[in-house]
Amino acid sequence: MPHIGYFPIGQYPRPLVLGSAAFIKRETSFDHRQDWSQLRNDALLTEQIFYAQVVLPQRARVTKLTLIGFRNDALAVMSLKLGGWDRWLGQITLAEVIADWTDGDSSGYDDTIDNPVIDNLSYWYFLEATLDPNDDTFDVALQRVQIDWS
């Protein structure tokens, strides 16, 4: 997972914003385009999954997860999940956003957070982004993610 930084107490950014460059691909193939502005499929028109590590202070309360991206095809899928993982307890999902717009650049959010209090002693937190274009690799592109917390 890419290291997005550990910050001194009281100096964590609010909100936490991660650009497309914070994500890495689950599989080892390199059929994707990734730069400072977007993450999208390159040639394949199949689902690809990407991960990014999330580091927030102990006992922080997540209040909203926002997905910002590009989508112009109703059959193309772009989703984002904020999750936590524990080697004994398994995986939990805190929030999930599924892109439901088709007019290009836009955003969607989830502010109904399950298990909103960060417990770094029990869980490792991550973002899981899924991109599945329909008939063109330019159908969907993740641009950035914002995590609001208090």
Image: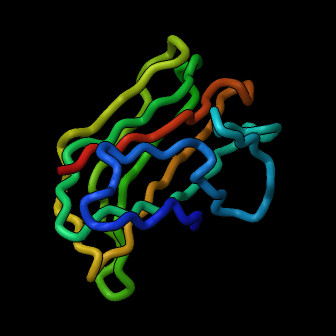
Is there any visible trace of residue 14 in the rendered image? yes
Q: Residue furthest top?
A: 103
- The spot of residue 113 in percent (x, y) is 20, 50
Q: Quadrant of the N terminus?
A: bottom right
Residue 126's image quarter? Answer: bottom left
Considering only vertical position in the picture, is 106 above or below 127? above
- The spot of residue 114 in percent (x, y) is 19, 56
- The spot of residue 94 in percent (x, y) is 27, 56
Residue 34's image quarter? Answer: top right
Q: Residue 24 or 17: which is nearer the viewer?
A: 17
- Left or right, 15 with respect to 3, comes to left
- The spot of residue 63 in percent (x, y) is 19, 46
Q: Residue at x 55, y 65 (%)?
A: 3
Q: Residue furthest bottom?
A: 88
Residue 2's image quarter? Answer: bottom right
Q: Residue 13 or 26: which is nearer the viewer?
A: 13
Q: Residue at x 52, y 58 (%)?
A: 52
- Left or right, 72 with respect to 81, comes to right
Q: Residue 46 or 140: which is nearer the viewer?
A: 140
Is there any visible trace of residue 115 in the rendered image? no
Q: Residue at x 17, y 63 (%)?
A: 117
Considering only vertical position in the picture, is 61 above or below 73? below
- Left or right, 52 with respect to 39, comes to left
Q: Residue at x 29, y 45 (%)?
A: 14
Total of numbered circles in the picture?
Answer: 0
The color scheme shown is rainbow
